[in-house]
Image (cartoon, rainbow, N blue to C red):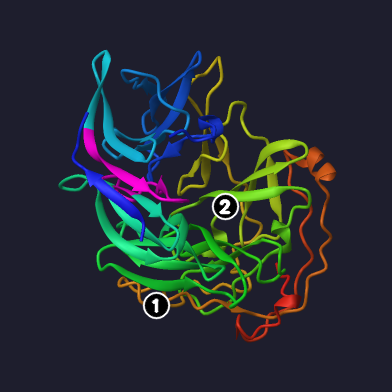
């Protein structure tokens, strides 16, 4: 069990750089980040839902450590998580005229080898915030803001957990990637009932992680080594569908890494038409990729100068909003419109009208595979992508019609390379 003790409210150093990006609320109204004044770091809140974005500095009585975590809430306040050795302190920051107000929320003490505490991604609604503590044998989900008192432990999960993806609009169903007995599988934690149920288990021997989910369409972005043992692949599926989890060749970018960071909302029952934004890193730098399940290509676009890398949000209308900061524009948002899809027809392997996870969270995703023969698309090296940042690469070859879905535990995964 994770050794954590709660302390009453009262007024560690992480090697990660705060310059990696910022954190946005689930609705994109606010953002928060650490920024620098000389050699000192201080919190900054961005307001993004007005006619023009603007930033409000929230400096405290002393500079912050680079490992300090921030998370904006829906009312404009900012949760701050400070580390001091084995102690973790939480407070809410808000502007008060020329200064910064601070409301202490309490503290926790987490001791033991390998024990860590991290904030989970912003919850829908923006009224509550959660953290996960990870010990050697178990993990716990805590509510650290929005409760009646200090930090409150909600659920204990056997195994070491990471990630964190919200599956609904109410902030009740949370997906975590759990390492147990040497393998990583995704589970669903029902925060109201305190239940833990399986979600993503592609094969007994594969490491399967959930990267992103869209509650409107049910689109899931998945990382797994099931189709290529020992090599992580990006795939997609539909929450609650009985049709295949797919691993498109179009998402294989040699010499590059691609990480999804935003899914277009509002595409109810049309997961194949959701635009997905990818952060792509390779020998030529970092840029933005746009991909849809219905298309067999990734469109490569230049990232704005000063992009707070890996942060952004889609609008339902298909506009990708990317926050950036430069010397000339210390608080800006660039807007990229997703190119229109090549086809509005439903893609092979989707089931928009299929069953969905029940509100109780008891039904796991039925991960299945078509077992279709491999597509013949060629992989383009990173050198060729350098000249295609403003335009997409050519489409992959068409795949044969998929036969009846087969459960992944029985599917010939060695031949599963589909579009």
Residue at (29% x, 40% y) in the render: 74
Image quadrant where one finds the C terminus:
bottom right
Q: Which residue of the protein is positioned furthest toward the front in this rendering?
A: 112
Front one among 35 and 29: 35
Front one among 167 and 142: 142
Q: Looking at the rendered structure, which numbered label has been put on residue 115?
A: none
- The residue labelled by disc 2 is 276
The secondary structure type at the circle numbered 1 is: loop
Question: Is residue 348 placed above or below 38 in the rendered structure?
Answer: below
Q: Position of residue 307 (x, y in %)?
A: 57, 31
Image quadrant where one finds the N terminus:
bottom left
Quadrant of res 350: bottom right
Q: Nearer the viewer, mark 1 or mark 2?
A: 1
The magenta region covers 104-130
Mark nearer the N terminus (1 vs 2): 2
Q: Is residue 216 visible?
A: no
Q: Residue 129 magenta-drawn?
A: yes
Residue at (43% x, 34% y) in the render: 12
Front one among 282 and 294: 282
Q: Residue 325 magenta-drawn?
A: no
**Does 192 sit left or right of 318 as displayed?**
left
Question: Is residue 349 placed above or below 337 in the rendered structure?
Answer: below
Callout 2 crowding tier (Cα within 10 Å): few <14, some 14–19, many ≥20 = many
**Does 379 sit left or right of 86 as displayed?**
right
**Does 390 sit left or right of 236 as displayed?**
right
Q: Position of residue 112 (x, y in %)?
A: 41, 50
Callout 1 crowding tier (Cα within 10 Å): few <14, some 14–19, many ≥20 = some
- The residue labelled by disc 1 is 363
The secondary structure type at the circle numbered 2 is: strand
Q: Position of residue 106 (x, y in %)?
A: 23, 39
Question: Is residue 223 placed above or below 117 in the rendered structure?
Answer: below
Question: Label 1 to label 2, Cα distance in Å?
Answer: 26 Å
């Amino acid at each position: 069990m994770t050794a954590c003790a709660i302390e009453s409210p009262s007024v560690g150093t992480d090697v990660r750089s705060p310059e990696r990006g910022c954190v946005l609320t689930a609705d994109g109204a606010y953002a928060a980040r650490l920024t620098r004044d000389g050699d000192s770091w201080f919190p900054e809140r961005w307001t993004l839902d007005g006619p023009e974005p603007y930033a409000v500095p929230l400096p405290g009585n002393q500079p912050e450590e680079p490992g300090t975590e921030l998370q904006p809430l829906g009312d404009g306040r900012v949760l701050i998580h400070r580390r001091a050795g084995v102690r973790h302190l939480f407070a809410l920051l808000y502007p008060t005229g020329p200064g910064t107000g601070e409301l202490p929320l309490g503290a926790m003490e987490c001791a033991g080898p390998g024990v860590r505490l991290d904030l989970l991604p912003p919850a829908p609604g923006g009224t509550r915030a959660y953290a996960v503590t990870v010990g050697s044998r178990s993990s716990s989900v805590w509510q650290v803001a929005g409760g009646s008192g200090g930090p409150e432990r909600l659920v204990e999960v056997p195994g070491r957990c990471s990630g964190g993806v919200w599956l609904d609009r109410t902030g009740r169903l949370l997906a975590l990637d759990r390492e147990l007995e040497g393998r990583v599988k995704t589970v669903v934690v029902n925060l109201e009932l305190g239940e833990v149920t399986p979600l993503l288990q592609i094969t007994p021997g594969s490491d399967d992680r959930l990267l992103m989910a869209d509650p409107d369409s049910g689109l899931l972005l998945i990382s797994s080594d099931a189709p290529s043992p020992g090599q992580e692949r990006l795939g997609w599926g539909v929450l609650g569908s009985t049709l295949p989890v797919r691993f498109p060749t179009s998402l294989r970018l040699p010499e590059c890494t691609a990480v999804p960071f935003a899914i277009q909302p509002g595409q109810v029952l049309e997961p194949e038409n959701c635009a997905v934004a990818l952060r792509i890193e390779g020998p030529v730098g970092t840029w933005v990729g746009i991909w849809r399940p219905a298309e067999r290509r990734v469109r490569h676009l230049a990232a704005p100068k000063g992009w707070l890398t890996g942060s952004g949000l889609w609008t339902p209308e298909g506009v990708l909003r990317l926050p950036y900061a430069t010397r000339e524009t210390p608080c800006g948002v660039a807007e990229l419109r997703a190119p229109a899809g090549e086809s509005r027809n439903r893609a092979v392997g989707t089931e928009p009208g299929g069953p969905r996870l029940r509100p109780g969270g008891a039904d796991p995703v039925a991960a299945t595979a078509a077992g279709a023969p491999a597509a013949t698309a060629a992989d383009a090296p990173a050198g060729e992508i350098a000249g295609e940042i403003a335009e997409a690469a050519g489409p992959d070859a068409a795949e044969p019609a998929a036969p009846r879905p087969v459960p992944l535990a029985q599917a010939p995964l060695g031949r599963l390379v589909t579009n």
